[in-house]
Amino acid sequence: MDIVLYPNPTLRAKNKDIEKFDDELKSIAQEMFETMYATKGVGLAAPQVGLNKKLLVFNASGDKERSEQEFVLCNPKIIQKSKKKELGDEGCLSFPEIYGSVNRHLSIKVQAQDLEGHAFDLEFEGWEARIFQHEFDHIDGILFIDRMTPTSKELIKHDLEYLRENLRPSNSCCDDNDCKNANS
Ligand code: ZN
């Protein structure tokens, strides 16, 4: 699986409910974990691998060996969120080397389905709550740059422009081998 990079429109497209809880879904989730670990991420949402589905995976440790911390959520919904919020630094696999400060709810209650389609409720706090909210936003077509503090957004302005310039579709780009278009 390849990570879809900003500004690829897949990241803003509408994501479909998962209706079939089959072997294909299980292997997609498995591959998403592998891609996430290989790119040193802690979470990944399906649109980031080019699949517009309501599916997200995360492991707050980012450590493949600590698989007990893995979460797979299909069709997640937020049922409650803490009033209290906290600022923290975030990155995103779809925005290489861009980091910024984002305000997130400290804890969040979630309803979702597992890979068999069984419904469950969970409450996340702190770092896990932050990761969940980041990935949940992806499912809604919302990106962390949309929620960054104005100061952070100002700081990353040029890096964002660079991504927009360099990740255009190949037909609008040159044939030069040095062209940074290879990721699009
Ligand atoms: Zn992200």
Image: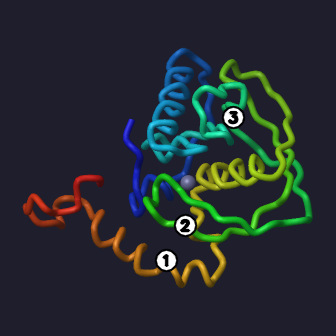
Q: Is residue 10 left or right of residue 120?
A: left
Does residue 39 lie above or below 153 as drawn? Answer: above
Residue bearing mark 3: 73
Look at the numbered disc 3 and give the secondary structure of its residue.
strand
Residue beneath disc 2: 99
Q: Earlier in the sequence, mark 1 or mark 2?
A: 2
Which corner quadrant holds the C terminus? bottom left
Q: CA distance from mark 2 to mark 3?
A: 25 Å
Residue that appears at 29% across and 53% down: 183
Mark 3 crowd level (few <14, some 14–19, many ≥20, 10 Å Cα): many
Q: Please give the name of the residue rendered at 29% of the width and 72% of the height, measured from the top-left corner.
A: 165
Which of the 4 quarters of the picture holds residue 160?
Answer: bottom left
- Identify which amino acid the numbered label 1 is placed on: Ile
- Residue mark closest to the camera, 3 vs 1: 1
Q: Amino acid at mark 3?
A: Leu
Residue 19 locus on image (x, y percent): 62, 27
Earlier residue among tags 2 and 3: 3
Q: Position of residue 36 (x, y in %)?
A: 51, 39
Q: Secondary structure at mark 2?
A: strand
Which residue is labeled 1 in the image? 156
Dot 2 amino acid type: Tyr
